[in-house]
Image: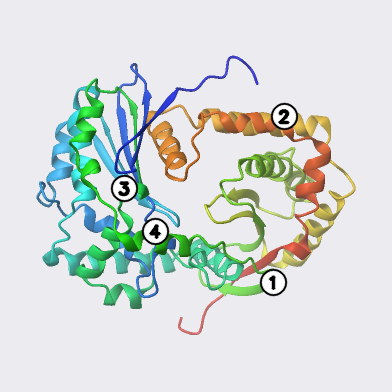
C-alpha cells in the first residue's frame, strides 16, 4: 500500500496472570486514553442472567474497594479527564481520557473501579429501576424494535438474537450475589485487555505489576463456560412482516450471514462489496433506487462484525405504498450483479473508501486504544493497518463469486416493517 499511510506502532505486554496490555506511544497527544476491555458482553450470560452484563456496567460505577460511590468520577474530572463505558454482545469496556500528567493515577483508578467493585446492596434496587426504565425507553423506539426483530429472526435461540439490555423478568430476579458471581466468572485475567494510547509512563510495567490487574486470578469454571459460549449461531433464512407503532416510514431490511471477526480477509472483502452496492450516490443500489427511480428515502448497507458470526445488513426506508416495488427492484439489481461483476472504476473507488475508513478510524487516542484492546482481547495480534494488506487480494472476479453470488434473496432473511398500531394502543 502507499508508503505515506502510517499508524502508531503498538506493543503487547503479557502479564504473568495471562491478562494483556497494549501500548501505543503518542507523545504529542493532548489526552491519553486508558481502555479496559473484558469478555463480559451479553453473549456470555447464562439462562436467567439476561441483562446482567449491562446491569453490571452500571453498578461498576457505584464504588469499589478504594472508591466511594461517585468518587471515581469526581477524581477523574478533577484530573481534567472524562470517563465512559459500553456493553456489547461480545465484550464490555471502560475507559478514561486524561491529560499526560494524570496517566498513572488514571490507570490506578480505572483498574480498581472495574476489577474490585463493591456492588452495594443499597444501590442495587435503585440502579435496577434505571436499567428497567432504559429497556422501556428502547421499546418505545420504532427503529430499535425493527432492528431487534431482525436479529431475533436471523439468530433464533441464540444470545446474539436478544437485546443487550436484557429482559425484564431476568433483571427483576437478579441478586447482588448473582452479579458478583458473573463478575468473578468473566472479569478474569485471560478475559481482560488493557490498552493505553497517548503518553506512556516510564514506570508502566512496575505500575501494572502492583495493580489490581495483576492481582486478578482465574477460577476453574471460567474456561469451560467460555468454550460453551463460543458456538456460532445458526442463521435462519426467511421472511416476515410486522407492524410497528410510531414508525414514520416503512422499512425493508435484509440480512445475510457473514464470517466471524477473526476472518479478516472476508471482512475486508465484505466491506468492499457493501461499498460497491450502497455507499454514496454512485453505488449500485443508491443510484438505482434513490437517484434514478426515486422510490426510496434512504439506502444503508453495512456489516455487523461479531466474534462468533457477522451479518450483512441492508435497510431501505420508503413510503409504504412503494414497498412491493422496492423489494422487486432490489431483487432485480442483486440478480443483475450475478451477470455484471464490478468494473475497475467501482473496485478502485470501493477500495479507497475502505482504506480511508480504516485510516480515519485511527485519528484519536480513544480510537487507537479501543481497536488495539479489542484485537488483543480476541487474539488478533496485528498492526493497526494490517487489514489493508487484504485489499489487493480482492478483485472484480472474486468479489462477484464470493459476495454477489451470496447476496441473493434465497440466502437472506427479509423483514418488512409497516407503520401501524398494536392492540394495546
Q: Cβ–Cβ below 8 Å for labels 1 and 2?
A: no
Considering only vertical position in the picture, is 11 above or below 171?
A: above
Secondary structure of the residue carrying numbered label 3: helix
Task: Please indicate whether residue 32 sits to the left or right of residue 396 in the image.
Answer: left
The CA span between labels 4 and 2 is 38 Å
Q: Position of residue 343 (x, y in %)?
A: 84, 34
Residue picked out by circle 3: 189
Q: Residue 344 location in percent, x, y? A: 82, 30
Query: What residue is disc 2 on?
Result: 392
Q: Mark 1 falls on what kind of element?
A: strand
Query: Which image quadrant for residue 332?
Result: bottom right
Label 2 neighbour load within 10 Å: few <14, some 14-19, many 20+: few
Q: Which residue is mark 1?
A: 239
* Residue in the foreground of this view, choosing between 383 and 279: 383
Query: Which sits earlier in the primary sequence, circle 1 or circle 2?
Result: 1
- Determine the CA span between mark 4 and mark 3: 11 Å
Q: Residue at x 22, y 72 (%)?
A: 175
Amino acid at each position: 500500500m502507499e508508503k505515506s499511510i502510517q499508524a502508531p506502532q503498538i506493543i503487547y505486554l503479557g502479564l504473568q496472570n495471562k491478562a494483556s496490555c497494549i501500548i501505543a506511544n503518542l507523545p504529542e497527544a493532548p489526552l491519553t486514553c486508558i481502555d479496559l476491555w473484558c469478555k463480559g458482553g451479553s453473549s456470555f450470560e447464562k439462562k436467567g442472567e439476561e441483562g446482567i452484563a449491562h446491569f453490571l456496567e452500571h453498578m461498576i460505577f457505584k464504588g469499589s474497594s478504594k472508591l466511594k460511590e461517585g468518587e471515581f468520577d469526581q477524581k477523574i474530572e478533577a484530573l481534567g479527564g472524562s470517563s465512559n463505558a459500553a456493553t456489547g454482545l461480545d465484550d464490555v469496556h471502560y475507559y478514561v481520557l486524561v491529560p499526560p500528567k494524570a496517566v498513572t493515577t488514571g490507570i490506578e483508578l480505572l483498574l480498581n473501579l472495574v476489577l474490585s467493585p463493591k456492588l452495594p446492596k443499597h444501590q442495587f434496587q435503585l440502579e435496577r429501576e434505571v436499567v428497567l426504565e432504559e429497556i422501556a425507553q428502547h421499546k418505545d423506539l420504532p427503529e430499535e424494535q425493527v432492528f431487534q426483530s431482525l436479529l431475533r429472526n436471523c439468530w433464533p435461540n441464540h444470545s446474539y438474537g436478544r437485546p443487550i439490555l436484557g429482559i425484564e423478568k431476568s433483571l427483576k430476579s437478579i441478586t447482588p450475589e448473582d452479579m458478583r458471581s458473573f463478575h468473578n466468572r468473566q472479569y478474569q485475567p485471560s478475559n481482560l485487555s488493557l490498552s493505553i494510547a497517548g503518553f506512556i509512563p516510564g514506570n508502566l510495567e512496575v505500575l501494572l505489576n502492583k495493580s489490581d490487574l495483576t492481582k486478578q486470578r482465574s477460577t476453574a469454571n471460567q474456561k469451560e463456560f467460555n468454550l460453551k459460549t463460543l458456538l456460532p449461531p445458526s442463521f435462519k433464512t426467511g421472511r416476515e412482516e410486522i407492524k410497528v407503532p410510531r414508525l414514520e416510514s416503512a422499512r425493508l431490511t435484509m440480512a445475510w450471514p457473514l464470517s466471524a471477526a477473526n476472518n479478516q480477509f472476508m471482512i475486508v472483502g465484505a466491506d468492499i462489496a457493501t461499498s460497491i452496492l450502497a455507499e454514496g450516490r454512485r453505488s449500485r443500489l443508491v443510484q438505482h433506487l434513490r437517484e434514478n427511480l426515486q422510490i426510496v428515502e434512504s439506502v444503508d448497507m453495512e456489516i455487523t462484525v461479531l466474534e462468533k458470526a457477522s451479518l450483512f445488513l441492508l435497510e431501505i426506508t420508503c413510503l409504504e405504498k412503494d414497498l412491493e416495488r422496492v423489494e422487486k427492484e432490489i431483487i432485480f439489481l442483486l440478480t443483475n450483479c450475478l451477470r455484471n461483476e464490478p468494473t475497475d472504476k467501482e473496485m478502485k473507488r470501493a477500495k479507497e473508501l475502505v482504506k480511508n475508513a480504516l485510516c480515519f478510524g485511527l485519528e484519536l487516542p480513544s480510537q487507537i486504544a479501543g481497536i488495539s484492546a479489542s484485537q488483543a482481547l480476541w487474539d488478533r495480534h496485528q498492526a493497526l493497518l494490517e487489514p489493508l494488506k487484504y485489499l489487493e487480494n480482492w478483485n472484480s472476479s472474486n468479489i462477484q463469486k464470493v459476495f454477489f453470488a451470496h447476496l441473493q434473496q434465497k440466502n437472506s432473511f427479509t423483514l418488512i416493517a409497516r407503520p401501524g398500531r398494536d392492540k394495546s394502543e
